Amino acid sequence: MSILIALIVFSLIIIIHELGHFLLAKANGITVLEFSLGMGPRILSHQKEGGTRYSLKLLPFGGSCAMLGEDGEDDSAKEEGSFQSKSVGARISVVAAGPIFNFILAFVLSIFIIGSIGYDPAVVLGVTEGYPAQEAGLQEGDLITKMNGKRIRLYRQFYNYIYFHSGETITFEYERDGEICTVTITPTLTDNGYKFGISGSTNYRYKTGPLKTLYYSAYEVYYWIDTTLQSLNLLIHGGVTLDDMSGPVGVVSTISETYEESKSDGIFYIWLNMLNIAILLSANLGVMNLLPLPALDGGRLVFLYIEAIRRKRVSPELEARVHFVGLMALMVLMVVVMFNDVLKIVK
């Protein structure tokens, strides 16, 4: 059952991403040759005469929206309904639509969670005696609003900021009885890392009205985008190792573990935890696809922006070679990460 749920979560995220490309392609008069879920040989396929082929493929990872002329041949620019025959603005909208639809999906799913159980404010639920936070005067019930000038609206943001800025002195801005206070605290080094002595919980939730539910749902998406970017920054600077990365196998394993752990709490909490994972994955996929790397949507956008600036298309052969090299590198990385995921499960 847990594997089935994992596949459903993956499929939902991928199909929404490809649906973004599909809908914008149709809106711009681009011929979509095939809309598929999965990779490899077709299992099921349906096509009306002269229309789009809709396919379900063997491997349950990935998907595609194959458009006429999207590979970039020079002749395709002359063909009616081809990707290359459309304006650069239209092509940018089609390519960007996939990641944007992932953010929209994350927002819609966030509405269900925030509407059901509320958001997690950065409320101090306790301070540890003898630690810097107590000595600085922080108290239970204080609401942290800023850390080194960065706006904090969720407890998870507070926790992540400390994680991504381990050992740093932090200026906290917090609200107490309607008053805004500021204090600068240097963490103390313990056997378990740097500690401020502040405790809180993501389980401490505050329910709000419809408008603020929409606001905090949008903020939930921002939180995951920001967390993904900070994690990438940590990866670039060597703060993350291969063991900290997960591919499809690792994600399926995490979903399975979460499902098993949630079963005792009832179906409502299984539902909420699966939605949380879907939000994380959808926002993460949106960010990763917008990175300016060859073979990804972001890499394709780079070439389109260059075309828009110089008013002349980059050589299709050069673009194809760049994307091919990027795709091969991406495939190698996926294999390495997948192999490492399997090793972690076997251990």
Image (cartoon, helix red, strand yellow):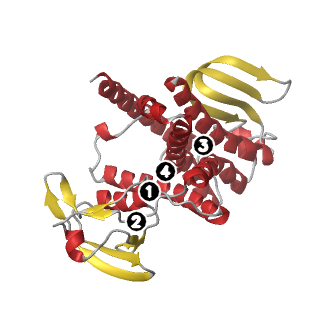
Residue 204 has which mark? 1
In space, the residues marked 1 and 2 are separated at their CA atoms by 8 Å
Quickly name the residue at label 3: 316
Q: Measuring from the top left, give residue 298's x and y in whole percent.
A: 54, 50
Q: Secondary structure at mark 4?
A: loop
Q: Residues within 10 Å of mark 2 (few under 14, many from 20)?
A: many
Q: Amino acid at mark 3?
A: Pro
Residue 347 vertical placement versus 94 (above, below): above
The answer for how far apart the CA atoms under marks 1 and 3 are is 54 Å
How far is the residue under mark 4 from the one under mark 2?
Answer: 34 Å
Which labelled disc corresponds to residue 291? 4
Looking at marks 4 and 3 on the same chain, the residue that comes earlier in the sequence is marked by 4
Please state which amino acid type lies under the numbered disc 1: Tyr
At a point 44% along the width and 31% down the height, the residue shown is 331
Q: CA distance from mark 2 to mark 3?
A: 54 Å
Among numbered discs 4 and 2, the one appearing first in the sequence? 2
Determine contact: label 1, label 2, CB under 8 Å: yes
322 relative to 312 in the view: left or right: left
Q: Determine whether label 2 and label 3 are within 8 Å by CB.
A: no
